[in-house]
Image: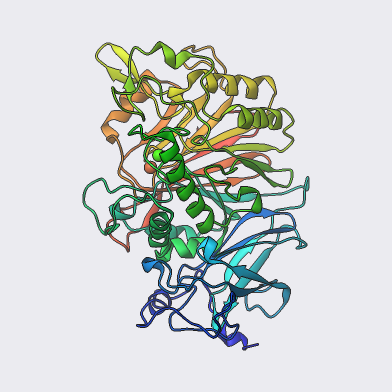
């Protein structure tokens, strides 16, 4: 084994130059030593096969998922031959990898774009680990991760960040460089990890390709996003938990219906390609392995007795958008649309809803966080004298929302907190079964995080009017990009809205725009 002088860190303190050096050499590809199914174990790579970095995810008390993908030429199909490649991995209890606690070999297959997922067991709870992959004569940099606390154990504090909506062309992912220097146990991504389409103004860089349709297209789009050094560093610094929204596949899709009303069998083939590429590029557990156009993302991730995450998927199983524009699928702004109130409409689908309601009914953790995509709080849009609703978020599924919030109330789910994204703006709201009834109880707190880069749908000048007509909305901000951190203890959750100065300067700074506290036993965020 090579000495520890060869360990390359992926995370803080790492020089930016290290990332640049890793993609600058000329020749590409694996020089093969064998024509059989497996590439030669002595394979030499002319370029770094770990150009997409490393990642970990889904912390459990005794393990986590490790991820990498061999791609010496990531933007040109990966640069690998159609061979199986052995990739060894090691997990150590120290940063220099001198105390290796587990090691093994995984197989990178062209069937999965040479992605590797390793699901570990048998580690100790609630402690950091470091890991690295090797293949041929190449080593990855060293990633850092940690296990979750033991089931039911007392936990003093869990700190997490959540992020969403990172349109590559509209800004640099500098927010992630700042996230890396936060002290966090886990990062949650709430969707729009890639964008399939080019839109917005003032692009700082380009996709350089049209909308993805095929598996190869989606692999290339994920590789482009994941080639960003700040995003790579955030993956290498913390374990992630992920869910998707629409843009991982196609804007405003609902179940098997696309916004352009493509033939469902055609759209499902596209969805299958997108879901597979998503799986290939995320540190997802085996339970999320895609099966054609189906993939189970919804799951619970527990952090001792302090915190349970319920990770939800509000795209795959939802009822079609109600009252769409003529000849279109997808979202619309609707005024008169009685079908909106049809009780059979669902955002989560009956199977996921039953699982969620059953889980929340038995919830024991002090804090129960619903990690989902879109805004849950009602937000009517002023249209002349009437109210109008945007149908893509929970406002398009109000009876399903009411069913969920009534269930949370009736089952006395301890300290429910909803986190969301999608709308490229910060919102802090009280969640009520009936938003139009001032006497309706506040049963949960909602924090919607702004986008990493994606441009907002409104202006800050509108926020006061929104708040005055909607007293359940406590705070809103459109103009800033960033993410949210939450520090949870048994007695309170402290929420910090982390806002970038701008996202068109790759060296821009970050600050806390506002902070809020949610006290144990008292739903609703208070200004800190
Ligand atoms: Fe988005
Ligand atoms: Ca979205």
Q: Position of residue 254 (x, y in %)?
A: 44, 32
The residue that appears at 31% across and 47% down in the rendered structure is: 197
Image quadrant assignment for residue 336: top left
Query: Is 326 placed left or right of 226 in the picture?
Result: left
Question: Residue most toward the left?
Answer: 202
Can you see residue 203? yes
Question: Residue most toward the front?
Answer: 35
Q: Position of residue 157 (x, y in %)?
A: 66, 49
Can you see residue 421? no
The residue that appears at 57% across and 57% down in the rendered structure is: 283
Q: Quadrant of ligand 2?
A: top left
Of residues 438 and 1, the one nearer the viewer is 1
Q: How many numbered tags mark residues here?
A: 0
Of residues 213 and 62, the one nearer the viewer is 213
Of residues 138 and 155, the one nearer the viewer is 138
Colour scheme shown: rainbow
Q: Quadrant of the N terminus?
A: bottom right
Residue 178, relative to residue 334: is it above or below? below
Q: Position of residue 3 (x, y in %)?
A: 62, 88
Q: Position of residue 129 (x, y in %)?
A: 66, 67
Residue 269, relative to residue 4: is it above or below? above
The residue that appears at 51% across and 28% down in the rendered structure is: 347
Query: Is 190 placed left or right of 360 in the picture?
Result: left
């Amino acid at each position: 084994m090579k000495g520890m002088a060869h360990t390359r860190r992926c995370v803080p303190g790492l020089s930016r130059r290290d990332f640049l050096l890793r993609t600058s050499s000329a020749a590409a590809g694996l020089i093969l030593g064998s024509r059989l199914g497996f590439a030669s174990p002595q394979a030499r790579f002319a370029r770094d096969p770990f150009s997409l970095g490393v990642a970990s995810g889904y912390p459990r008390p005794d393990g986590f998922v490790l991820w990498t993908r061999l791609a010496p030429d990531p933007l040109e199909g990966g640069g690998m031959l159609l061979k199986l490649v052995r990739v060894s991995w090691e997990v150590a209890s120290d940063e220099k990898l001198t105390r290796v606690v587990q090691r093994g070999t995984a197989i990178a297959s062209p069937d999965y774009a040479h992605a590797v997922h390793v699901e570990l067991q048998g580690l100790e709870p609630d402690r950091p680990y470091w890991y690295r992959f090797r293949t041929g004569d190449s080593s990855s940099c060293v990633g850092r991760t940690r296990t979750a606390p033991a089931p039911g154990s007392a936990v003093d504090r869990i700190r997490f960040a959540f992020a969403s909506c990172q349109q590559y062309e509209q800004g640099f992912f500098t927010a992630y460089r700042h996230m890396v220097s936060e002290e966090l146990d886990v990062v949650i991504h709430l969707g729009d990890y890639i964008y399939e389409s080019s839109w917005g103004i003032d692009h700082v860089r380009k996709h350089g390709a049209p909308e993805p349709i095929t598996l190869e297209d989606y692999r290339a789009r994920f590789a482009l996003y994941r080639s960003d050094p700040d995003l790579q560093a955030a993956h290498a610094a913390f374990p992630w938990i992920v869910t998707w929204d629409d843009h991982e596949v196609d804007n405003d899709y609902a179940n098997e219906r696309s916004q352009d009303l493509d033939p469902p069998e055609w759209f499902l083939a596209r969805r299958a390609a997108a879901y597979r590429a998503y799986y290939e590029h995320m540190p997802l557990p085996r339970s999320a392995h895609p099966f054609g156009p189906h993939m189970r993302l919804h799951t619970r991730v527990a952090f001792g007795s302090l915190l349970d995450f319920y990770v939800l998927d509000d795209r795959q199983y939802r009822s079609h958008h109600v009252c769409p524009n003529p000849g279109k699928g997808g979202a619309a702004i609707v005024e008169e649309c009685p079908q909106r109130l049809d009780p059979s409409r669902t955002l989560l689908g009956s199977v996921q809803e039953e699982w969620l309601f059953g889980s929340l009914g038995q919830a024991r953790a002090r804090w129960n966080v619903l990690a989902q995509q879109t805004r849950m709080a009602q937000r009517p849009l002023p249209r002349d004298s009437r109210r109008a609703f945007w149908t893509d978020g929970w406002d398009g599924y109000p009876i399903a929302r009411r069913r969920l919030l009534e269930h949370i109330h009736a089952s006395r789910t301890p300290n429910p907190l909803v986190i969301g994204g999608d709308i490229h703006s910060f919102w802090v709201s009280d969640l009520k079964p009936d938003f139009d009834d001032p006497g309706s109880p506040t049963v949960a707190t909602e924090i919607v995080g702004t986008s990493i880069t994606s441009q907002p749908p409104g202006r800050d000048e509108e926020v006061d009017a929104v708040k005055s007509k909607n007293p359940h909305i406590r705070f809103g901000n459109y103009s800033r990009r960033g993410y949210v951190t939450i520090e949870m203890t048994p007695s309170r959750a402290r929420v910090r809205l982390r806002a970038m100065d701008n996202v068109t300067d790759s060296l821009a700074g970050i600050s806390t725009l506002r902070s809020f506290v949610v006290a144990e036993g008292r739903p609703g965020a208070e200004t800190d």
